[in-house]
Image (cartoon, rainbow, N blue to C red):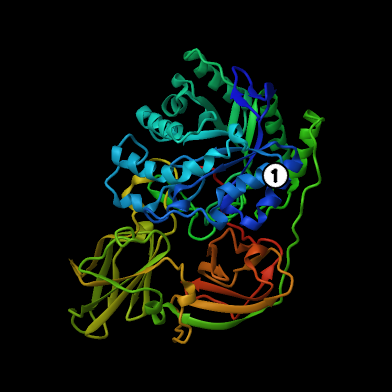
Amino acid sequence: METFEIGKKDFILNGQPFKIMSGAIHYFRVPREDWYHSLYNLKAMGFNTVETYIPWNLHETNEGVFDFSEGKDIEHFLDVAQSLGLYAIVRPTPYVCGEWEFGGLPAWLLEKDVRLRSRDPKYLSYVEKYYQELLPRLVDHQLDHGGNVLMFQVENEYGSYGEDKDYLRAIRQMMLDANLTMPLFTSDGPWRGTVRAGSLVEDGVLETGNFGSKAAMNFADLESYFAEHDREFPLMSMEFWDGWFNRYNEPIVTRETDELVESVRDCLRLGSINLYMFHGGTSFGFMNGCSARGEEDLPQLSSYDYGAPLNEQGNPTEKYYALQRMIHEEFPDIEQHEPLIKPAMATQPIALSDKVSLFNTVDALAKPIETVYPETMEALGQNYGYLLYRTHFEKDTKGDDEETIRLIDGRDRAQVYLNQEHLATQYQFEIGDKIQTPLTQKDNQLDILIENMGRVNYGSKLAADTQRKGFRQGVMVDLHFILNWQQYCLPLDNIEAIDFSGEWMENQPAFYRYDFSVNDAKDSYIDLRQFGKGSVFVNGINIGRFWNVGPAQSLYVPGAFLNEGENTIVIFETEGVHSETIQLVEAPLFSEVEGKARTK
């Protein structure tokens, strides 16, 4: 049986000093069929360890319903890594950040009277129920049980959120009680304020640093704090940022390869490293995260390419080969291999097979929930996607006088239709502005389609009111709130229920179906330059969101999601902008966005 422990200056593997050379691969952002490909390329570069988060909301999307099957099978992921000779670092923390929806917290927590990430007994009781399902699955994968897991994380960047040490100790104790016997750690920004608030150094728990450059300075800061507590630990960057994530309507963030390589070299000479990310992959479905800049929410792209050594589909980039060369220079005895490369494919234009307006198939997709006042998405038991609100109101104005409609306290993006004619689109701060229109009939139908564009995953807005999607107050006509609402929950997890026999109407949200055949399925990207905004489904799998504001103008289509033979792509488009044909292409497409790329 192998052994691993945390020494005073080094990690100790089987009695010998050990430098952890790890790369982050999130199993939930890579199709299960491609786990081997990504993990092999990590080992081939010369690294010895893989790191992954485990998002709570992936495995308990709905309260009390747990899923560890297929692409959520963390145990199989660890088995594949072990078969390749890779050790693992696992981060089963309640909160993960990770540019993942709500930082990995399940949306249903917003309907509970709890204080997130705190000693609150009610919050901890929900964590404990989740851990009772999760942690036993990890026990046999520990190194001292014949597995490959070296360490587990207690909490993630907690010093950038709170300083509740009783909370950290409660999470640690749950892990110990579940028979997690391998060492535990925390990770934070390396400066004293976050380390003091977010670590358990005083309890002898390893603290690691998250940074992407200036290793000597950042490690010195960690050592200084260790010394305050008469502790000595090996130095490790648990997130060495080799790129960055991207947001809508902002330029792509890039990092120069040569500068990255030298920064990684500096880190490896001083300590251990986990490259974040090694393979970024894709935030499939509606699981993209959201940044916050002041009061403004900034949703992130579905693509989590991150500018990592492997690109979104998992193939080596310039950074990969440059890092591989540097590793050979610094550690010539480490075994390296040529990486695996997946081919990509392009198709001829694929013709539109059918189309239908949302309003003419919504009853096939959802049963309306009737309430006097409109309810939030979470109150209706929905976590992600879209929500259609519908009501009727009488005309009170005279003749051609305009009526005033106002959406009060709603999030994120609202499209307003009067008698199924598009009236206005309001986004974030625009919600609440007056919408003025003449009424041409006595009875009027008001439809409001609201999109949850992703909950904030980091910082002070984690528990803000704006994390609750849909209407928190309601809708006013003239100067009063109107009543009697029908609400259609549209998580779009059942698109096979779409009834394409209904009518398609211009300038309405609609579904578009494209049928095609493939003889040799490979990775590709769907060209979305002729569409406005929405989501794409490949053989029923939600591959992510698109928005023509850029910078991304395509979505990644894994070959694993395609069939040999017949395939169907359905596009839900909300702006009334579509194309009679689509095409799969071999590389991602981008548009220029004015402004400066920002990492904050």
Q: Helix or strand or loop: what does disc 1 sit on?
A: helix
* Residue to which mark 1 is pinned: 83
Above or below, 568 against 382 in this view is below
- Left or right: residue 349 versus residue 217 is right
Q: Position of residue 418 (x, y in %)?
A: 32, 78
Label 1 neighbour load within 10 Å: few <14, some 14-19, many 20+: few
| Quadrant assignment, res 584 | bottom right
Quarter of the rendering occupied by the N terminus: top right
Q: Is 540 or 466 nearer to us in this picture?
A: 540
Question: Is any part of residue 96 visible from this angle?
Answer: no
Q: Position of residue 308 (x, y in %)?
A: 66, 46
Residue at point 75% right, 46% down?
318
| Residue at image coords 55%, 16% | 232
Whole-percent x, y for residue 91 in the image: 52, 39
Q: Height in image: 490 above or below 53?
A: below
The amino acid type, in three-letter code, at marker 1 is Ser
